[in-house]
Image: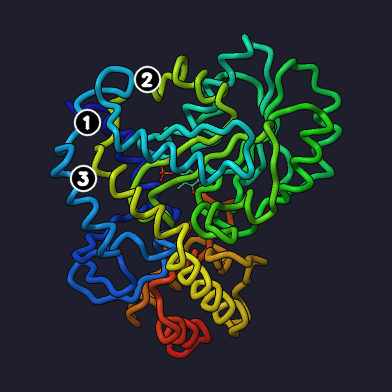
Amino acid sequence: MSFTQLDALTAHLNELDAQGLRRFRHGVESVCQPHLLVDGQPLLAFNSNDYLGLAAHPLVVEALREGASLYGAGSGASHLISGHSQAHARLEELLADMLSPFLPSVRALYFSTGYMANLGVLTALADTAKGDITFFSDALNHASLIDGIRLTREPCQVYRHADTADLPQRLSTCQSGTKVVVTDGVFSMDGDIAPLQALLALCEQHGVWLLVDDAHGFGVLGDGGAGVLQHFNLRSEQLIYIGTLGKAAGVSGAFIAAHEHVIEWMVQRSRPYIYSTASVPALAHALLTSMRIIRGEEGRRRRAHLHTLIQQLSTAPVQAAWQRMASTTAIQPLVIGSNAQVLKASADLKAQGIWISAIRAPTVPVNTARLRITLSASHTTQDVDCLVQALAGGGLS
Ligand SMILES: *Cc1c(COP(=O)(O)O)cnc(C)c1O
């Protein structure tokens, strides 16, 4: 007799195939950089979030090695037991210092991933409000923000993407004692930057929190790489900032930066923080080196080079049927349309040695399946030339 519940699950997998929604993983055989060996095939990759090329930076790799010899392979416990190392503590101090021009009385809290950081901060905020809280979430926010809000089991209003005209009415009519506007800093699948000046003005006018997830801005935006707050030169104690450290910072992890009382409350109450083993201290040790590079002259050089590449790509022609998005960041998506079309485009590029991932629903809205092209400071202008030629249609149908 067959187990019908397993049969039902198998039918769901077949359904994914039928809709062009099955996702596959590919075994990368080399260090994270543009020229990769993937399942035995050499590819020029435009799909990592290693925007500054620090994942393979010799000094960062060496610091990771040094961290392992200083602190061992694991942390042994959660942060509140015995897992909080000197490396974690020093990293938090450095991150707080970096964000201090933008966040008064700032403190930073390191998390093992950005996904966890978002669950951690949203649930901790809800925990202060005793059921009297509403979240206001941009329609294109990252899944980890959506899931963090869901985990609170509190009400959420989804406002139109980047639409600051849609929010005032919602904020004035909502009766909750605590309100939190939640947004990506740079939208992960579109590459546009949130209208943070207008959003912060609104939040200040209404006396509510503004929570910004800057996974794709930290390290890349702003003169010193401090991210989207530096880009707009914002400063407010109503801001709660999340930066991730596995993208431009090239390693792993994330942090919340906010007023010290917000952070202390999280240390006391944030369950995703408290009930999870602290990340490997060597990662924090490596991140200290990564932060020094980001803040220093080399970081500035890498950001300038990345900017040159963005200009090069964003002014090049692409096939008429493909729609470019209004992005000035390292995320330069091309909307292709249906799942079948995007899979074909991605496969055609791969046959020419170029690796760009096909992004489909539910990551992006149905029928806006896209090639999510990302640039890195470790690309050369010649690499981008290759990409531009392929996108112009040579050999593609
Ligand atoms: C990648 C990403 C995250 C998750 O960060 P991880 O460290 O990869 O878990 C959160 N928010 C946004 C907007 C992201 O793009």
Disc on the earlier residue, 2 or 1: 1
> What residue does disc 3 label?
67
Q: Can residue 311 be seen by looking at this rendering?
A: yes
Q: Residue at x 26, y 26 (%)?
A: 83
In the displayed structure image, the side of residue 170 where residue 12 appears, left or right: left
Which residue is painted at 30% across and 27% down in the image? 84
Q: Position of residue 48 (x, y in %)?
A: 39, 62
Q: Mark 3 or mark 2, which is nearer the start of the sequence?
A: 3
Quick check: 90 left or right of 220? Answer: left
**Mark 2, residue position:** 274
Task: Measuring from the top left, give residue 4's x and y in whole percent.
Answer: 28, 27
| Front residue of 172 and 160 | 172
- Mark nearest the camera among 1 and 3 is 3
- Secondary structure under the numbered disc 2 in the rendered image: helix
Q: Of the residues shown, which amino acid type is indicated by label 3? A: Gly
Label 3: state its secondary structure: helix
Residue 18 shows in this picture: no
Q: Which residue is mark 1?
A: 75
Counting from the top left corner in percent of width and height, residue 108 is at: 48, 34
Q: Is residue 101 left or right of residue 50?
A: right
Outermost residue, top side: 130
Spatial CA span between label 1 and label 3: 12 Å
- Vertical comparison of 43 with 393: above or below: above
Residue 367 picture quarter: bottom right
